Amino acid sequence: MIALIVGTNRPGSNTGRVAAHVAEIYAALDEPPQIIDLHQLPPEIFSPTSYEKPPASFTPFEEPIGRADGIVIVVPEYNGSIPGIFKYYIDMLVDPEQFAGKPVALVGLAAGMWGALRPAEQIEAMLIYLGAVIYPKRVHIARINEHLDETGRVKTPAYIERLEKQAKGFIEFAGKLKK
């Protein structure tokens, strides 16, 4: 099972749109991912007492990480970094070491010209610390607003091809690590 994390809680985000398109690509390859949408995090997770014991409503956001054979993270760049909610999500996991030994693929997007290169590097550093195995073929979509159609799907053939190639390669990569 592939878990797909939508790395922002911004409603109606381009990240959510790209993640939906990525999910379709995986589904077409007979690997429909379980989506973890940080926009749907329960409000009680933000209580200071959640650090001691996350509420039961957080379980659907944590449990897929433990079960996943691979994790795909779609993340935007906010102010040259990762969205704070993504870091908070990782911090709230009861056992962030669930990432240990798991393959992780990254898709970055940004309004600027680097396509979330910095956030991807920051996430990789954090996940390497947690023992994840980083899939080396990242996809960075720069100037994201130029590459989405009116429905929010990626419209640029070169980016669609990169996303499809990444998905095929990542499924194979995760399968080899599972064995």
Image (cartoon, rainbow, N blue to C red):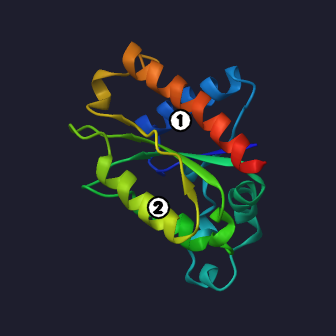
Give 40 or 27, whichever is nearer the viewer.
27
* Residue 19: assigned label: 1
Which one is earlier in the sequence, the residue at label 1 or at label 2?
1
Q: Position of residue 178 (x, y in %)?
A: 76, 49
* Residue 158, placed above or below residue 167: above
Per the image, label 1 sits on a secondary structure element best described as helix
* Residue 163, placed above or below residue 80: above
Instruction: Determine the image quadrant of residue 121.
Output: bottom left
* Residue 85: assigned label: 2
- Identify the residue at horizontal 32%, vertical 30% (top origin): 144
Cα distance in 3D space between marks 1 and 2: 16 Å
Q: Position of residue 149 (x, y in %)?
A: 40, 16
Looking at the image, is mark 1 or mark 2 nearer the viewer?
Answer: 1
Mark 1, other Cα within 10 Å: few <14 / some 14–19 / many ≥20: many
Give 158 or 156, whichever is nearer the viewer.
158
* Residue 11 appears in view: yes
Give 11 or 106, whichever is nearer the viewer.
106
User: Amino acid under label 2?
Assistant: Ile
* Residue 152 appears in view: no
Q: Position of residue 81 (x, y in %)?
A: 31, 58
Instruction: Tell me: 144 left or right of 151.
Output: left
* Residue 157, placed above or below residue 59: above
User: Amino acid under label 1?
Assistant: Ala
Per the image, label 2 sits on a secondary structure element best described as helix
Q: Position of residue 71 (x, y in %)?
A: 62, 48
